Image (cartoon, rainbow, N blue to C red):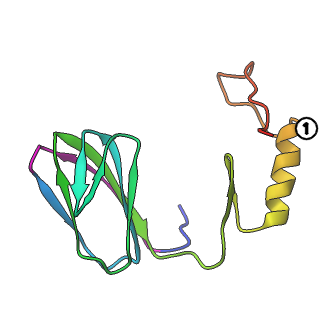
Amino acid sequence: MRTFSQLFYVDVAMPAGCEVPLPDEHVERAAYVVEGVIGCGAERAEPGRMIVFAPGADVRVRAEATSRVVLIGGAPIGGERHIWWNFVSSSKERMEQAKRDWKDGRFPRVPGDELEFIPLPD
C-alpha cells in the first residue's frame, strides 16, 4: 500500500488508571475514544470523541475508566483540505463535482445495501 506521508495508527486497550505517552516525533497526533473515558491535561473525552493535540505538546493519555483508544497521526500532507458532509478534497472544484455526482447517482451503491440512498443535504 502506498502512503503519502509518515503516519501511525495504534489501537490501545487501557485499564483504568493507565497512562500512555505519545511521542512528539509526529507533527499531527490525535486520540479517538472507541470505548471508555480518557483524559489528557484538562481535556476529557468519551466514546465518539477525538482529541487533537498541538504539535510538539507533551502528551500523556490517561484512562479514567477501562478504555479502548485509537492513537493516530503523522506528517501533514501539504495543501488545504475542504470538508463538506461525507466528502474531503484538496480541490473546491472536485468537491462540487462530487456533490453533483452524488445527487445524480453516479457513486456506486454500498455492497449489501443497494436499496438505501441517503440524499445530499441541503
- Where is residue 58? Give x, y as percent: 23, 75
Name the kind of residue labelled 1 in the image: Asp
Which element type, helix, strand or loop, lies under badge 1? loop
- Asked whether 74 or 122 is in front, the reply is 122
Q: Is residue 78 above or below residue 85?
A: below
Residue 95 percent across, percent down from the top left: 79, 57
Which residue is denoted by mark 1 in the rendering?
104
Number of marks present in the image shown = 1
Picture quarter containing residue 13? Answer: top left
Give coordinates of residue 56: x percent, y percent.
32, 81
**Nearest to the observer: residue 51 or residue 88:** 51
Q: Is residue 103 visible?
A: yes
Residue at left offset 22%, top offset 42%: 67
- Residue 9 included in the magenta stretch of the image: yes
Q: Quadrant of the C terminus?
A: top right
Residue 25 quadrant: bottom left
What range of the chain is rendered magenta? 6-17
> 21 above or below 44?
below
Q: For mark 1, does the 10 Å Cα neighbourhood hold few (<14), some (14 to 19), or many (20 or more) residues?
A: few
- In the rendered image, the residue lying farthest to the left is 17
Which residue: 51% across, 76% down? 76
The residue at 68%/47% (across/down) is 85
User: What secondary structure is the magenta-colored segment mainly?
Assistant: strand
